[in-house]
Every structure is written in structure tokens, then in C-alpha cells.
Image (tube, grey):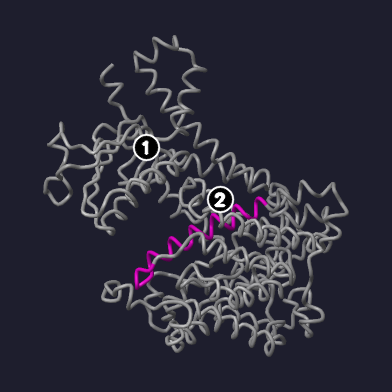
């Protein structure tokens, strides 16, 4: 693509230079606002907050983000991924009363924003890049299922209170299906059908679908259906006429401080919100960088700081958590958005629509927004994602399912993530222990003590994976020193590596970047795999580092992988070294 070959100097930049692309960003901002309005309203409702809170969040994010930087085509705002965590936090902090819990969860939102800013100062932006991808996928799948389970009653036409017990919600579902409201369900079902039809791969190729975003079409349908059927107010969105006087809520810091029994719950809520926000934010900008037509690269730490500042300001005026939106950002790119200024126009159009269109918004049935959220939840957990994870390796789906199952049974995202990580560590330990069992020298020292095997496997997974670094002036393996183009690599800098996993890949990254700081470009690097395991996260990192080296003018090759057996045919599959077993 021609734009992808554009030099960095010619690429649209943020700040004052980016204002010359105002026409592109203005039109993109309008389209994203039409898409983002129903999403923001629905996310607020799914979070247990007033609908206006979602729009407030979007407006603040759009107004602030361009001045904080960190990305290019990203549109920030509230995200469905945080809705279950916000709703659970509101329920627990309010001791079952969402009205009481809302001002307290705003306190957690403000504290989470501050924590993200602090983390960005300590280069925490790199952490989520190496978070186990299977755990991230499991977390997103769990969030998708939670959203669907929570929104099904509204789609069926029921006005039921929120329950923090997912099994209980599933147990009540058959009775809710049998007693559904036919008219309300019909309106929601048509909205759901529109979304699935509009996002069908064949329909999406039609030019007219780009001019009319599917969520906008759903909102138009909902407004017409709400007017025609004259639904009671309990089935409709409710936005106050005087937004400044009736719509804005503030965090209740004094109440949070006066109830020490809530401090532990508040801390856990802050940690969950920060973990999900940081992980999803950084994963989203990495994905968006891959589709940026100008091949620009976001700064993870600056983005994390921007999300933290935006979240803090949003929470102070009753808004939700701020996060880069994958759906809105993709729409921005497809609409021709060039810089972060598209966020400003997006926020402006959202404010105008909210100010002058509140009467129309209040005609939209809640079932329509439930359909929109169910569709977004389906996108997070549909079977194609399951199959994609399975193609990488069966162990990946075990880890992801552990996260999903624990989250659904406990309604606790943090516990689900922790169990997912523990499952990942257990599977890695199993393979390292099995490999150590074939090492006669290690057996003679430990006398086949399982405890010794376990301790050694944990040490290997968490310690610095660099065994040694040599400049390789004398080559003993000339047949291996061949780059992908077929040419020989002369005098490589050899880096011998032990087992690499998501647990120690950050230490590897620090060592390799330190090496590059002392090695001028046009030199050769050879990464030599000599450990027992290389997991999927580490394989992703090695591929990323090799591409980074090529971009910076180095030649980098990875050798030793012929001794490893991958768990699937995927190029970046988890692999185990069976050389010790064969030797035994």
C-alpha cells in the first residue's frame, strides 16, 4: 500500500501540525460519534451507571486525549470490557444497592486513573505486552459472556435487579424466557438481526454500509419502534433534560474514607479496574498500530498515562473508565481519520447530539441497547475465537477456559485472571520437570525429589533467560549461520538463551535492548535457544524482536529451534525441547 511506504516525516503527526488534516478528522469524528453514542449509552447501562455517564466519559476522553498523545488513530472512551467489573464493584461497594455503590465506584475510578499515571512513570507500559495472551483471551471471552448474561433479561423485556451471582442468573433465565414481553423482545431481536446482518462479511463489502454505521441504523430502528409502540418509560433510556443539574454525579470520597470496612473491597476494585484497563488499552493500541495505513507506532507508556489522566477527570464528574476503543478506532481509520484531533471532533459532535437530541434518545428502548451489547459480547467470545486459540495449541485453550470458567462461577474477574496465570505456570512447570527428569546430572544431585524438580523448574521459568552473550568471532556452527535470504551471517553476536516464557521475557527484552545499545547497526545477532521450553508469548516476542532488528538495520536470526517440538502447526506455537529426552 502506498501510504504504508510513506516516510515518517510525511506521515500525519499529532499536535499543531495535525490540524491541517482537519477535514479528514472532522468527517471521521462525525461518523465515529454516530457509532459511539449508542455504544456509550449501552456501556453505561451495562455498568450499572446512569446512561448519561457513558456520554460524559466519551466527551471527556475525546476532549483530553489529543493533548496527551501516545497514539494516532485511536478513539478513546468507555469500553464494554470494563462494564462487568464496574457493575460488580458498584454492587459490592454499595452492599447490593447500586445507587449507593455508584458514587463509591467513582472513587475507585479516580484512584485507578491515578495508579495508571504512576505506573506509566515506571515504564509499566511494557508489562501488558508480555502478559500471557491466552489469559488475555480468556479474560475477554469471560467479559463477553458476562455482558451477554447480564443483558439477556433486558432483551427479553424484563426489569430485574442486577445479581452478582452468574449461576443464579443462568438458573433464572428459563423462567424469564417463558415470561418474555413479546413486543419488547421483537424490537430487540430485530436490532440484533440488523447487527448480525450488517456485520456479515458479504454485506460489509457493500459501499453503503460504510456510510451508515450499523449501530446508528439500530438506534434509528429503536427510536421509531419506541415511538410506534409507546413503551412505558421503564422500558426506555432515561437522560435528564438538565444534564448539568441532574445528570452529573460526583465521587463520594468522604463516605469511602468514613467506612474502613470498605477499604479492602475498594482496593480490590481499583486493582481489577487498573489491570483490565491497562491490559486492554495496550493490547488495543498494538492491534491498531498494525492497521495504521502510515505504519506509525504508539507509545505504550504515554498512552497509559493519557488513559489514566482521562479516567481521573472522567471519574471526578461521574464518568466511567477511559480506554482505547477498538471498534470506534477502526471506524475512525476506515472513515479517513488521520490524527488524534478526530477525538476532539468526535467529542464535539457527541456533545451536540446529546444537547439537542435528548428527546430522541429517550425514545430508544433499553432492549435495543441490550441487543447492541449482546452483539459486542458475542464478538468477544464467539466460536471463531475459540478455534483461533485452539490452532495455536491445546494448552492455550486450557488456560483460557480456566480463566473463563472460574470467572463465571465466582463472578470475579481478578480471580479468573489469577487462576489463568496459575494454570499457565503449572503447565510450564510440568514440561520443565519432565525435561529435567531426563537430565542424568540433575537426577544424581536431587535423587528424583519432586520438590527439587519443582523448585528448579520455577527458577528456570522466572530467572534471567540469558545464559551468556559472546561476540562469536570464532564460529563452530557455520551451517546454522544462514539468514532467511540464504546469505551467510559473518561474525554474529551470539546470545545463548535458557527457557523463555511470559514470566521472564521482560528480563530478556531488557538484556537484548542493552546489547543493541552497544552494538552499531548493520551487525549480526544470533539468538541460540538452549532451554527446555519456549512458550507462545515468548515466541511472539522473539518474532517481534527480530522484526524490530530488521527495521533498525540489524540482521537477526534464531537458531536451535530444530531441537524443539511445537504443540501445533502454528508458527508461534508453544514448544518443548526434547533433545534431552532423545539423548537419554
Within 10 Å of disc 1 (Cα), the crowding (few <14, some 14-19, many 20+) is many
- Which secondary structure class fits the magenta region best? helix
The secondary structure type at the circle numbered 1 is strand
**Quadrant location of the N terminus in the rendered image:** bottom left
Q: Nearer the viewer, residue 474 or 3?
A: 474
**Quadrant location of the C terminus in the rendered image:** top left
Within 10 Å of disc 2 (Cα), the crowding (few <14, some 14-19, many 20+) is many
Residue, x 44% and y 82% (percent of image)? 18
Q: Which residues are magenta?
A: 271-296
Mark 1 touches mark 2? (CB < 8 Å): no
The secondary structure type at the circle numbered 2 is helix
- Quick check: 137 left or right of 203? right
- Quick check: 236 left or right of 522? right
Relative to 197, say whether 210 is above or below: below
- Quick check: 217 left or right of 299? right
Residue, x 35% and y 18% (percent of image)? 438
How far across and down, in percent of the image, does residue 583 sit? 26, 19
How far across and down, in percent of the image, does residue 36 sit? 57, 76
Relative to 313, say whether 224 is above or below: below
Q: To which quarter of the image does residue 338 belong?
A: bottom left
Q: Which labelled disc corresponds to residue 235?
A: none
Q: Rounded to the nearest whole Å, what is the CA distance between mark 1 and mark 2?
A: 23 Å
How far across and down, in percent of the image, does residue 513 sit? 37, 49
Q: Nearer the viewer, residue 343 or 241?
A: 343
Relative to 508, say whether 30 is above or below: below
Q: Which residue is mark 1?
A: 534
Q: Which residue is mark 2?
A: 139
Residue, x 43% and y 62% (percent of image)? 287
Q: Residue lying farthest right?
A: 258
Residue, x 63% and y 66% (percent of image)? 309
Amino acid at each position: 500500500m502506498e501510504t504504508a511506504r510513506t516516510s515518517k516525516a510525511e506521515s500525519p503527526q499529532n499536535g499543531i501540525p495535525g490540524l491541517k488534516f482537519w477535514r479528514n478528522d472532522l468527517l471521521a469524528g462525525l461518523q465515529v460519534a454516530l457509532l459511539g453514542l449508542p455504544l456509550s449509552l449501552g456501556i453505561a447501562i451495562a455498568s450499572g451507571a446512569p446512561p448519561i455517564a457513558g456520554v460524559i466519559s466519551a466527551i471527556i476522553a475525546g476532549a483530553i486525549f489529543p493533548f496527551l498523545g501516545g497514539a494516532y488513530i485511536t478513539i478513546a472512551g468507555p469500553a464494554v470490557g470494563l462494564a462487568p467489573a464496574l457493575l460488580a464493584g458498584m454492587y459490592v461497594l454499595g452492599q447490593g444497592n447500586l445507587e449507593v455503590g455508584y458514587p463509591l465506584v467513582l472513587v475507585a475510578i479516580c484512584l485507578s486513573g491515578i495508579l495508571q499515571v504512576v505506573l506509566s512513570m515506571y515504564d509499566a507500559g511494557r508489562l501488558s505486552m508480555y502478559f500471557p495472551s491466552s489469559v488475555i483471551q480468556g479474560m475477554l471471552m469471560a467479559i463477553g459472556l458476562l455482558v451477554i448474561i447480564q443483558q439477556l433479561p433486558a432483551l427479553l423485556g424484563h426489569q430485574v435487579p442486577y445479581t452478582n451471582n452468574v449461576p443464579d442468573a443462568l438458573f433464572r433465565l428459563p423462567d424469564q424466557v417463558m415470561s418474555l414481553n413479546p413486543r419488547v423482545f421483537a424490537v430487540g431481536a430485530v436490532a440484533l438481526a440488523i447487527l448480525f446482518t450488517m456485520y456479515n462479511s458479504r454485506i460489509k463489502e457493500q459501499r453503503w454500509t460504510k456510510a451508515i454505521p450499523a449501530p446508528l441504523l439500530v438506534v434509528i430502528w429503536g427510536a421509531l419502534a419506541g415511538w410506534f409502540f409507546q413503551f412505558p418509560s421503564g422500558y426506555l433510556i432515561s437522560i435528564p433534560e438538565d444534564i448539568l443539574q441532574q445528570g452529573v454525579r460526583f465521587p463520594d470520597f468522604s463516605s469511602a474514607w468514613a467506612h474502613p470496612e470498605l477499604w479492602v473491597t475498594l482496593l480490590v476494585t481499583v486493582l481489577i479496574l487498573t489491570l483490565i484497563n491497562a491490559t486492554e488499552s495496550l493490547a488495543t493500541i498494538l492491534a491498531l498500530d498494525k492497521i495504521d495505513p502510515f505504519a506509525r507506532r504508539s507509545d505504550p507508556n504515554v498512552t497509559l498515562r493519557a488513559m489514566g489522566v482521562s479516567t481521573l477527570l472522567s471519574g471526578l464528574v461521574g464518568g466511567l473508565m477511559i480506554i482505547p476503543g477498538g471498534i470506534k478506532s477502526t471506524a475512525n481509520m476506515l472513515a479517513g481519520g488521520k490524527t488524534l484531533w478526530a477525538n476532539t471532533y468526535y467529542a464535539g459532535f457527541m456533545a451536540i447530539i446529546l444537547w439537542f437530541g435528548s428527546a430522541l434518545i429517550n425514545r430508544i428502548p433499553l432492549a435495543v441497547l441490550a441487543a447492541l451489547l449482546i452483539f459486542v459480547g458475542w464478538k468477544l467470545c464467539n466460536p471463531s475465537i475459540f478455534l483461533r486459540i485452539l490452532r495455536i495449541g491445546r494448552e492455550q485453550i486450557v488456560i483460557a477456559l480456566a480463566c473463563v470458567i472460574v470467572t463465571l462461577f465466582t463472578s470475579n474477574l481478578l480471580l479468573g485472571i489469577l487462576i489463568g496465570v496459575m494454570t499457565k505456570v503449572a503447565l510450564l512447570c510440568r514440561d520443565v520437570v519432565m525435561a529435567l527428569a531426563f537430565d542424568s546430572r540433575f537426577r544424581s544431585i536431587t535423587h528424583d525429589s519432586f520438590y527439587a524438580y519443582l523448585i528448579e523448574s520455577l527458577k528456570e521459568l522466572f530467572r534471567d533467560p540469558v545464559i551468556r552473550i559472546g561476540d562469536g568471532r570464532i564460529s563452530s556452527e557455520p551451517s546454522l549461520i544462514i539468514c532467511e535470504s540464504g546469505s551467510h551471517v559473518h561474525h554474529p553476536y551470539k546470545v545463548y538463551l535458557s527457557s523463555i516464557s511470559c514470566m521472564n521475557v521482560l528480563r530478556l527484552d531488557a538484556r537484548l535492548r542493552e546489547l543493541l545499545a552497544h552494538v552499531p547497526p548493520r551487525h549480526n545477532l544470533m539468538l541460540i535457544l538452549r532451554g527446555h521450553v519456549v512458550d507462545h508469548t515468548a515466541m511472539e516476542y522473539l518474532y517481534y524482536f527480530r522484526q524490530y532488528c530488521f527495521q533498525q538495520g540489524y540482521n537477526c536470526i534464531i537458531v536451535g529451534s530444530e531441537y524443539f517440538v511445537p504443540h501445533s502447526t502454528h508458527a508461534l506455537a508453544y514448544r518443548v525441547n526434547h533433545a534431552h529426552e532423545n539423548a537419554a
